[in-house]
Image: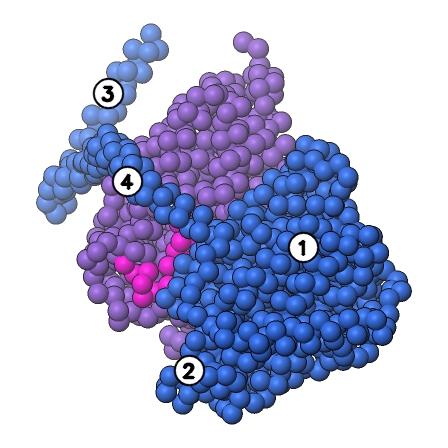
């Protein structure tokens, strides 16, 4: 099919590339227009398979639009719009371009119908998102970004290896559909590894808090939405029902919660919490039933919104005060009340308060776990909810906006409500969080499978309220123990960070020595003779060839100059000379002619 | 040779040839320098746009000459005014008409005195160059061939550098000396076949001795033009002294006339001699590749460096031609176009440097990249193209040529590969020096980056570098039929069939 099909990612990517050319007056409307167009396109696209491109020996499918990809495409388009509104006042074009390329990459991966297209956009996401970390330009940003890039490149490599093995060597063809989860091959594990790394499944998760905590205040809002959820989509598409994902998801949920409680930096806390929430989604994919997959999609949808809202709130605090650590904040409700309200709404959503979005999405997965009689999974996920409310619903709002005011004077002076666009973006996200919670058909209609779940049962409401109430009691009883301390939690990245230093030493000492020897040898034996012969060739050209040519020309010129002197201007001399020459020629000709004739 | 009817209806080739000449008449009346520049730009752009229908109306399925025009010119000597295009000359005509407006743009601020004469020289050159590629009558070809000598010598000799007179004279006499032999060969061919019609000369049963003499006479002329080693020394002198537009025309178009002459005369008309001399021509081509690379490496004058790189690149083109197979010939043709684009661009780039710094010495230009990043981006792309980096146009051409050469003899690649490495060496060294330099670069902080005019001059060439490099089919598909016909004419079988048994 060679008709042109407008990919929403194309709108974002082209829009981003053209941004530097937009005049200053039209910049803000343009910044809102492009994601709005992309979102509208994602919303209005008909279902089907589009955008097939024949490239060399492959058929690349850019537009596989079905229920599963539509729901992810919808929320990602929407989140891109909200996040761009949030970052509307950012002057640096590079940040917007990187963000849109990143969102475009995510959309491209969502709608990819074959593995090659998926991989292409996978890498686009990795390469563009690293700039959202680097643009912070903090003392740690460069290193954090590099770690992020290296880890994602490794993940991409695993994914590519799996793709090549699966499609080419395994002969399964290139289209991206569910793999055989009951008989997984090495190729399937490699692909799974690539997906799990992007989903930040422990032990491959350490990049997430490292990078998301270090990103720009607006960049992290983008970062939290796309990479992990694209990985969740990929897992939904490729590995539904893979049993190992259930324990992995549950471990993730608990692991993230534990580390989040220990965190001092609010954005790192939220980042660890992403791991926890994605754990629910991974467990949902592992359960594999229709309700579980629905739950994973619904939870991803809700999570993008409320996690984005939370990152926006903490990003606003960071932007206005310059601080993100709990030990440097506190008592800000006087200065930033609106931000507090929005962040609180996000916190309540994530804790699955009734009437908020988390309530109607998270429970689907837990219910699916109980339905499949995996009681341990269901109860442990509920335990993770306790931790969630504890740190995100209680700790974050309390220690930033209430509690002991540990702000430095400079911080306190700077603190104020953020610009209108940031508040507007947070308001939109907050309204959606509440709206989804209150009016469930809005979300449930978009889910891939028909929904037969009613969250507002008396059992569910009372169970949730009990959990949350007792968590709140526990928080206030143990508040002294939960006070933030300026510590750094060691995580799995200790291994590769230390390992990297060792590798670096290896490169700097022994390998560099060998390289220097080779370089010297190359210079002495290769470069010097080469330049010598080159100069020789140049001299040959100048002296010998040109010497011959110019010399010949010079000789002709000299001969001509001498011959010219024969003409002295006297007519009689010239005439006699010419007659003499003609006579000589005729005589010579006659002699030769008569000799030949004989 | 059957005639395909002209689908355009107009005598488009004559219009393209004499249109610039008509523009000269108007230019004679214009007083203001500013208007002269705009008028010349308009005229050359009109020719460029007007030549596009040639591509779209070209029938790629037939090797016959198209857009034919035939009229009687000098009946007493049987000289006719015959014009036509086939797949080989189509791309060269398009290259010529495209490069001309860029030459005018590149000379916008460069030429400040005698602007009218300069623009007139450029327009006459366009007439002559397009005429050479379109002519199908031998004397008409020769007239256009000689006609471009005088404007070119003027371009070098009047608007050139310190040794302009020496360079102009050298260019003129060297080329003229070669063309004298060409004229003798053409007349001899006429005496054998009875007409000056070039297609009519192909396929005629000449004796082997005659073929050898004709081949050598034509080859001398074309070898000087290409330029093949060892007849190349006029090229560095001419390029160094010529103004930017002169260098661009010289490199992009004039050198192609030499290889075009091989393709139009030597291969189809004297196939036996071609086969006989093939090893020597291949040897000389390889020598040019290596020699051009070595000498370019030793240069510190940018223009001389690019001039010697031209020697190397044209060595690849002649290598492809004398490999006498499809890959080699198509590679050679493509390489001709690529060289026109890339080396033309490089000369414009060097001209930009010269306009700002008034020097072309590599040491004095070191470290420009810091203050002129857009310029360095353009230079980087064209440098990569010059060293045949994959993804750029020259890669396709050189790859095809090497494939063809390999089919001829395995040792060809053995000798040509170091040439490719040398090209990388001198081009990367130049790029590194200009872009980054060393630790003690001259102070370039006052220099302005590329202006809009300069970017517009380089942008089409940049587009072609990547277009031909990533999607060469639109350019190669017009060549197939004509190359096949050329190979038939110059094939081994026909070579020996033409020779009457003796």
How crowded is the residue under tag 1: few (<14 C-alpha within 10 Å), some, or many (20+)?
many
Q: Which chain is purple?
A: B
Tell me how many marks there are: 4
User: Mark 3 vs mark 2: which is more N-terminal?
Assistant: 2
Q: Residue furthest front?
A: A477
Chain of the residue that carries numbered disc 1 in the rendered image: A
Residue at 40% x, 58% y: name it: A143
Residue at 73% x, 34% y: name it: A171
Per the model, the C-alpha gap separating discs 2 and 4 is 46 Å
A487 vs A426, nearest the viewer? A487
Provide the residue designation for mark 4: A509
Provide the residue designation for mark 3: A588
- Specify whether residue B159 is in view: no
Provide the residue designation for mark 1: A250
Would you say the magenta stretch is mainly helix, strand or loop?
helix
Provide the residue designation for mark 2: A406
* Foreground label between 2 and 4: 2
A253 vs A209, nearest the viewer? A253
Q: Secondary structure at mark 1?
A: helix
Per the model, the C-alpha gap separating discs 3 and 4 is 88 Å
Chain of the residue that carries numbered disc 4 in the rendered image: A
User: Mark 1 vs mark 3: which is more N-terminal?
Assistant: 1
The magenta region covers B367-383
Chain of the residue that carries numbered disc 2 in the rendered image: A
Q: Position of residue A430 (x, y in %)?
A: 67, 81
User: Mark 2 vs mark 4: which is more N-terminal?
Assistant: 2
Instruction: Please check whether the numbered discs 1 and 2 fall on a single chain.
Output: yes
- Circles 1 and 2, Cβ within 8 Å, touching? The answer is no
Q: Position of residue B374 (x, y in %)?
A: 40, 64
Chain A: drawing colour: blue
């Amino acid at each position: 099919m060679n008709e042109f099909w407008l990919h929403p990612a194309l709108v974002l990517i082209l829009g981003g590339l053209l941004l530097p050319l937009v005049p200053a007056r039209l910049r803000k409307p343009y910044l809102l227009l492009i994601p709005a167009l992309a979102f509208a396109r994602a919303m209005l696209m008909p279902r089907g398979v589009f955008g097939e491109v024949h490239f060399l020996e492959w058929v690349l499918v850019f537009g596989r639009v079905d229920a599963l990809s539509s729901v992810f495409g919808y929320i990602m388009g929407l989140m891109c719009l909200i996040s761009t509104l949030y970052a509307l006042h950012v002057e640096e074009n590079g940040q917007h371009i990187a963000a849109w390329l990143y969102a475009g990459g995510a959309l491209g991966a969502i709608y990819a119908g074959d593995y090659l297209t998926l991989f292409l956009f996978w890498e686009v996401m990795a390469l563009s998102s690293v700039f959202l970390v680097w643009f912070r330009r903090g003392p740690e940003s460069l290193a954090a970004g590099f770690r992020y890039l290296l880890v994602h490149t490794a993940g991409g490599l695993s994914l590519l290896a799996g793709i090549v093995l699966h499609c080419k060597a395994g002969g399964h063809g290139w289209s991206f559909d569910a793999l055989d989860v009951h008989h997984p091959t090495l190729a399937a594990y490699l692909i799974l590894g690539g997906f799990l790394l992007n989903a930040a499944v422990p032990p491959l998760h350490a990049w997430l808090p490292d990078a998301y905590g270090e990103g720009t205040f607006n960049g992290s809002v983008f970062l939290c939405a796309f990479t992990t959820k694209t990985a969740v989509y990929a897992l939904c598409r490729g590995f539904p029902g893979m049993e190992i994902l259930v324990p992995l998801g549950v471990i993730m949920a608990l692991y993230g919660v534990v580390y989040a409680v220990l965190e001092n930096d609010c954005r790192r806390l939220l980042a660890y919490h992403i791991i926890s929430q994605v754990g629910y989604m991974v467990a949902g994919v592992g359960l594999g039933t229709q309700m579980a997959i629905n739950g994973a999609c619904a939870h991803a949808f809700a999570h993008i919104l409320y996690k984005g809202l939370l990152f926006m709130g903490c990003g606003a605090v960071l932007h206005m005060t310059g601080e993100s650590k709990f030990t440097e904040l506190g008592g800000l409700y006087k200065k930033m009340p609106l931000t507090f309200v929005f962040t609180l709404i996000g916190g309540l959503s994530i804790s699955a308060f009734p009437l908020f979005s988390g309530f109607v999405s998270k429970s689907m997965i837990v219910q699916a776990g109980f339905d499949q009689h995996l009681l341990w999974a269901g109860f442990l996920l509920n335990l993770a909810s306790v931790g969630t409310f504890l740190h995100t619903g209680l700790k974050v709002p309390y220690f930033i906006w209430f509690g002991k005011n540990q702000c430095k004077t400079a911080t306190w002076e700077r603190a104020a409500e953020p610009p209108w666009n940031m508040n507007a973006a947070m308001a939109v996200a907050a309204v959606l969080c509440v709206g989804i919670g209150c009016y469930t058909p809005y979300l449930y209609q978009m889910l891939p499978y028909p929904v037969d779940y009613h969250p507002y049962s008396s059992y569910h409401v009372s169970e949730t309220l009990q959990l949350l109430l007792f968590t709140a009691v526990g928080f206030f009883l143990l508040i002294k123990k939960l006070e933030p301390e300026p510590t750094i939690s060691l995580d799995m990245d200790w291994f590769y960070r230390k390992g990297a230093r060792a590798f670096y030493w290896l490169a700097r000492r022994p390998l560099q020595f060998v390289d220097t020897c080779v370089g010297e040898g190359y210079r002495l034996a290769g470069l010097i003779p080469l330049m010598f012969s080159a100069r020789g060739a140049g001299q040959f050209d100048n002296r010998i060839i040109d010497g011959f040519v110019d010399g010949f020309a010079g000789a002709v010129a000299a001969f001509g100059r001498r011959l010219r002197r024969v003409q002295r201007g006297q007519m009689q001399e010239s005439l006699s000379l010419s007659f003499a020459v003609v006579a000589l020629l005729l005589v010579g000709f006659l002699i030769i002619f008569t000799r030949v004739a004989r | 040779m059957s005639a395909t009817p002209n689908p355009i209806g107009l005598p488009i080739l004559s219009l393209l040839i004499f249109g610039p000449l008509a523009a000269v008449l108007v230019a004679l009346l214009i007083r203001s320098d500013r208007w002269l520049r705009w008028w010349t730009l308009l005229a050359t752009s009109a020719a460029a746009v007007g030549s596009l229908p040639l591509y779209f109306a070209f029938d790629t399925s037939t090797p016959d000459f198209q857009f034919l025009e035939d009229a009687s010119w000098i009946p007493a000597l049987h000289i006719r005014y015959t014009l036509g295009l086939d797949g080989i000359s189509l791309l060269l005509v398009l290259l010529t008409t495209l490069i001309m407006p860029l030459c005018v743009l590149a000379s916008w601020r460069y030429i400040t005195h005698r602007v009218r004469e300069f623009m007139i020289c450029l327009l006459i050159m366009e007439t002559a160059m397009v005429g050479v590629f379109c002519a199908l009558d031998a004397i008409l070809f020769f007239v256009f061939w000689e006609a471009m000598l005088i404007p070119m010598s003027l371009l070098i000799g009047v608007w050139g550098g310190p040794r302009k007179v020496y360079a102009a004279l050298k260019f003129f006499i060297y080329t003229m000396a070669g063309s004298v032999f060409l004229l003798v060969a053409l007349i001899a061919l006429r005496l054998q076949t009875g007409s000056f019609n070039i297609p009519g000369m192909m396929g005629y049963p000449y004796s082997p001795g005659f073929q050898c003499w004709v081949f050598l006479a034509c080859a001398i002329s074309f070898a000087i033009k290409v330029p093949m080693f060892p007849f190349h020394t006029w090229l560095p002198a001419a390029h160094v002294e010529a103004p930017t537009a002169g260098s661009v025309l010289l490199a992009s178009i004039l050198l192609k006339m030499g290889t075009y002459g091989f393709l139009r005369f030597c291969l189809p008309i004297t196939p036996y001699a071609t086969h006989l001399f093939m090893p020597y021509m291949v040897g000389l081509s390889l020598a040019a590749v290596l020699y051009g690379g070595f000498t370019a490496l030793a240069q510190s004058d940018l223009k001389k460096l690019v001039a010697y790189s031209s020697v190397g690149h044209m060595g690849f083109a002649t290598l492809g031609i004398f490999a006498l197979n499809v890959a080699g010939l198509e590679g050679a043709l493509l390489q001709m176009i690529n060289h026109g684009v890339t080396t033309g661009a490089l000369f414009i780039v060097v001209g930009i440097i010269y306009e700002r710094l008034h020097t072309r010495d590599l040491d004095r230009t070191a470290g420009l990249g810091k203050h002129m990043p857009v310029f360095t981006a353009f230079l980087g792309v064209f440098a990569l193209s010059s060293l045949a980096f994959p993804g750029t146009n020259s890669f396709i051409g050189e790859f095809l040529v090497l494939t063809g050469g390999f089919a001829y003899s395995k040792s060809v690649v053995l000798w040509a590969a170091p040439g490719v490495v040398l090209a990388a060496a001198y081009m990367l060294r130049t790029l590194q020096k200009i872009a980054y330099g060393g630790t003690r670069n001259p102070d370039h902080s006052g220099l302005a980056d590329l202006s809009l005019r300069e970017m517009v001059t380089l942008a089409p060439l940049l587009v072609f570098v990547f277009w031909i490099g990533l999607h060469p089919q639109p350019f190669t598909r017009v060549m197939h039929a004509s190359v096949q016909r050329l190979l038939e004419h110059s094939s081994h079988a026909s070579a020996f069939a033409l020779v009457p048994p003796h």
